[in-house]
Image: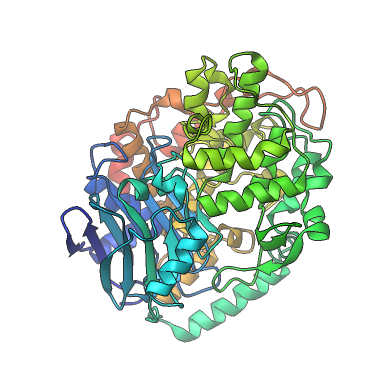
Amino acid sequence: MNGWMGRIVMVDLGGHSQKEIPVDGETRRRFLGGRGLGTKLYSDLCPVPIDPFAAANALLFMTGPLTGTVMTSGRYEVVSRSPLTGTICDSSSGGSFGAALKGAGLDGLVVTGRAERPVYLYVHDGIVEVRDASAIWGLDTQKTQKAVQELTSAKASVACIGPAGENRVLFAAIMNDKDRAAGRGGMGAIMGAKNLKAIAALGGQATAIADADGYKAMAARLDRAVDKNPVTGKSLQVLGTSVLVNVINAHGMFPTRNFRGGVFNDAEGTSGEKIAESLLQRQSACYKCPIGCGRTTRTKSRNGEGPEYETVWAFGAHLGISDLTAITEANYACNELGLDTITMGSTIGCAMELHESGALKETMLWGDAARLAGWVEDTAYGRGFGAELALGSKRLAAKYGRPELAMQVKGMEIPAYDPRGAQGMALSYATSSRGGCHMRGYMIMPEILGHPVFLDRFVTAGKPEIVALIQDISAVVDSAVLCRFLQFAMGISTLSEMLRTVTGLDFGDEELLAIGRRIYTLERLYNNRAGFTRSDDTLPPRFFNEEFQTGSSRHRVVRLDEMLDGYYAVRGWDTQGSPTKATLAALGL
């Protein structure tokens, strides 16, 4: 078999049993792997939405047909129902764990049940061992990875949780290869609920390539395209993802103080340029990645990786904090404790506005950099007010009677692009299948960065078609599985060629787009069953009612009502956002 290893193993931690899940060739072709096949399998295993922390809930670790082959192919996808949002959710991570899992002989690992005591899994040579983890329960993620490698192999790639996952913080991350994170949606909390501390993967099985010569030629062209592209060949290499700080700030849509402003006066002091000047030690890169967008950094007292753009914002402008050291060390703490930095920072910002409004007595002040790391640690361990921060912003704001102060969609916090500055991004947030997420359809590419063409960011006409198209392409990339940054350097035709040369199957552009539509529609079906409707495809009222008074996005509001019906029509959904019978038939669902 070319592209796939042909094996997906399901482990029941409670029943102490294992079995293989058969996947026929037609299903592989229709869903590929990663996010797509993971969503298909999860929907089959858990067709009726259940408590994410229930023993019967499934947690899937998925690779794809391109994993371990071309550049940036070390990624993997974790699929389940999010404890933070209640939606179907996949969380993606880089590093080398995906390539290691596939090299161990598996396309995917499905975990069900709950172990009686802490365990870890050791996947090697097609074998999955369940081993006792009692001695490492309670360790942070970096100590856990080191301990698991000592128990297995120094060459093993390890994905694990820290105290946040053990304590079922609703936005706990799964960390792998030290500082890579499957961050969004709380997948780490599901591991904690299953008493699963870590997974170690080790293996050297190569992915079979159908057309070796065609593959080499395609890979060479892709390498040149990545090198020539100004984003992948220069900006990300030189300044990392935080190159966006000054760019987004200049567009007046860099959220400040819980999205009440769009310009941060000290953006330069927290920018990629400033990180390079004051903290950067060297670039870091994931498996087979020529871009190297990661930043290995050091403060006066600590060292680690990051912060990325979203983290710089979440712990910086969003909180009125300009202390780059405090921001960076809060990022280190999140990596070690296993927390999603976006939700962590956004929830703190929500608490600060709750306090300012008089709804919250707990003292949470804008610009309080000195207490930032302590809030992060308290959240991971559920100490004091940290136990309330661990709920995420939606539950926190609702508890104190001000739900409108949570900057979230479907329970997931919106990241660092204010939607008043980009109408397409607003629509993408509102219709995201996993909640307030920029990665479902990154409209910043055409609306701000001009890729593949510039679109007027304040115009709503034509945006439904473009948003749906980018969402579909992104679903395919997540299912292949590759890094999204490649989308700057390649189009759908290059992705088709990749899959053809690796799998030997004649994937065409239209077939790939149909796969993307199928995946997005399947996610919608699950969310409909979980109770999500048109009323959930919206944004916090702030974005409809409050205009910025300064910056290049001033006097703008989101005009979602001009786009949502058109988006549903493009998708083949009815006016309430449910896929029609004709659409399901056309997609074979």
Residue 37, quarter of picture: bottom left
Q: How many marks?
A: 0
Residue 393, visible in the rendered structure? yes
The x, y position of residue 62, in whole percent, is 37, 60
Vertical relation: 514 (above or below) 235 = above
- Relative side of 369 to 310, left or right: right
Q: Nearer the viewer, residue 279 or 420?
A: 279
Residue drawn at the location 60% of the way across and 26% of the way down: 351
Q: Nearer the viewer, residue 296 or 131?
A: 131
200 over 322 or under it: above or below: below
Provide residue 521's location: percent of width, then percent of height: 37, 42
Q: What residue sits 66% from the left and 56% below the top? A: 306
Q: Indicate the quadrant where residue 297 lies.
A: bottom right
- Farthest residue toward the bottom? 213
Q: Residue at 32% across / 40% down in the picture?
A: 52
Can residue 503 be seen here? The reply is no
Q: Is residue 520 left or right of residue 59?
A: right
Quadrant occupied by the N terminus: bottom left
